[in-house]
Image (cartoon, rainbow, N blue to C red):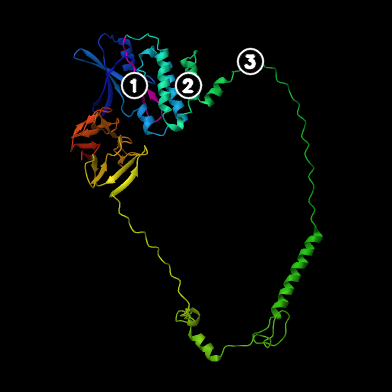
Amino acid sequence: MRHLDISYQVKGQASFLVLEEQEGEQVIPYCVRMMENNRIPGLLPMFSQVIDEQEKFNYEITGKMKLSHMVQNTKLTAENGKKLLFNLADAMLNLEEYFLNISGCVLSEEYVFVDTQYHVFLVYNPVASQGQDKSQEIKNFFLEIIGLFSSKPELKEQFNECLHFLIRPDFSLKAFRESLEPSGDREISAQPTKPLQAAQPLQPAQTVKRKPVQEAPVEEVKKDKAGFGRFLEEKKANRQDKAVRQETTPLFGGDIPVPGFKAASQAAPETKSKGRQKQEKKSFSLFGKKKTSKVELDLEDHVIPADQPREEKQQQASPAYQPQSWSGTVMEDEGGGTVMEGELENGGTPCLIYQGKTYPLLKLPFSIGKQNCSLSMIKPTVSRRHATITLEQGEYCIVDENSTNKTYVNGQMIPPYSPVPLSDGDQIACSSEEIIFKKG
């Protein structure tokens, strides 16, 4: 791939990748108008500018992430990796619908962008150097992407089938895309369609003779006179039996034996004295409610003997704190490295100061963001991966990761993906969160 003059700029609240026209290149006006007037799937939106007789192409990358950064900073599965490869091949093949050539695509993993839904976006350079055969460059591009995926140990052997397909002498991009198509869609498309059969002429309907419906004979319900008479007799007998029971009910205190009742002499003996009965009569309150009697406890049943030991819960004493040489908190970042949070005892180590806490830069790159970062800020205005501290040629730099609310150094907004050197005491702002850089 030839050398390209690419930079990053921030205009308002949007971020752009800027590609400048090279000397000796001729811009194709048709391609420029096609890209400016259409949202082409798989390509970054673009508009052109002419500054000092030099044309610049601005590709908007707001809300998108570099493919290389996504693979390094997120947990990529084999399924999502193959989905990205399929979307790349599909984007290249769909360019023909807009009369664009694949040779205009900038095929480098550094300039491939993705969103959270694994849609891919390429940079398209509308210059007259198109028309060259890029079949080998396309194969090398996909080999580069698969090599990027295989850098993760868990994905090392998941793309062997794709590698074997790329090194075939009869490689074609269309067949490569079909090999990456989801299995469900492939089975549906592989089923042959049945040819349509000619419609058969309609036949006249046949008349059907209905048979007359015979009604079932209705049987007359005869009254059972004998049964009704039996019912009256039973009812009369029940009345007589009830009258007899009422006459034989004994009076209170009577000694006449009656079946089903006990005589007064056979009743349970009265155990309550007259004095007790009087006390019970007095126990009724003025309003007719009985007062609650006091419950007397037998203390002998509830007193614990002196010789029986009481069961007491013994609290386990917490182990004594062992002082360490580092007076802070040890954390583990997303890359497996160790990061200390606290105050440096001896000084001399470059660090970041955020909300009164010191974060030494013991492992680089040092990520700043909302999730799975070396310095985590649970703030709604901070992006998941907002910025990164790196070491460029022995100098500490900060790189904005195309964050939504931007990164500022000493009040100056910095462009995305562009390392900015840091000096001792510089004030960094990730959105509205302020950080101070100290060289130690």
Mark 1 vs 2, N-terminal side = 1
Mark 3 vs 1, N-terminal side = 1
Residue 113 belongs to the span the image colors magenta: yes
Where's residue 312, x and y in %? 43, 70
Q: Amino acid at mark 3?
A: Gln
Q: Nearer the viewer, residue 379 or 32?
A: 379
The answer to whether residue 69 is above or below residue 51 is: below
Nearest-to-viewer mark from 3 and 1: 1
Q: Amino acid at mark 1?
A: Leu
Element class at badge 2: helix
Residue at x 56% of width, y 20% of height: 190
Give, as a single range, the part of the protein colored magenta: 112-127
Which residue is disc 1 drawn over?
44
- Main SS type for the magenta part? loop
Which residue is disc 3 drawn over?
197
Quarter of the image holding residue 34?
top left
Numbered marks: total? 3
Q: Amino acid at mark 2?
A: Leu
User: Disc 2 to disc 3, how far (Cα)?
Assistant: 45 Å
Nearest-to-viewer mark from 2 and 3: 2
Which label belongs to residue 415?
none
Which residue is disc 2 drawn over?
163
Where's residue 12, x and y in %? 23, 28
Quarter of the image holding residue 287?
bottom left
Q: Nearer the viewer, residue 380 or 414?
A: 414
The C terminus, quarter of image:
top left
Where's residue 326, x and y in %? 28, 48
Q: Nearer the viewer, residue 252 or 413?
A: 413
Element class at badge 1: loop
Q: Residues within 10 Å of mark 2 (few under 14, many from 20)?
A: some
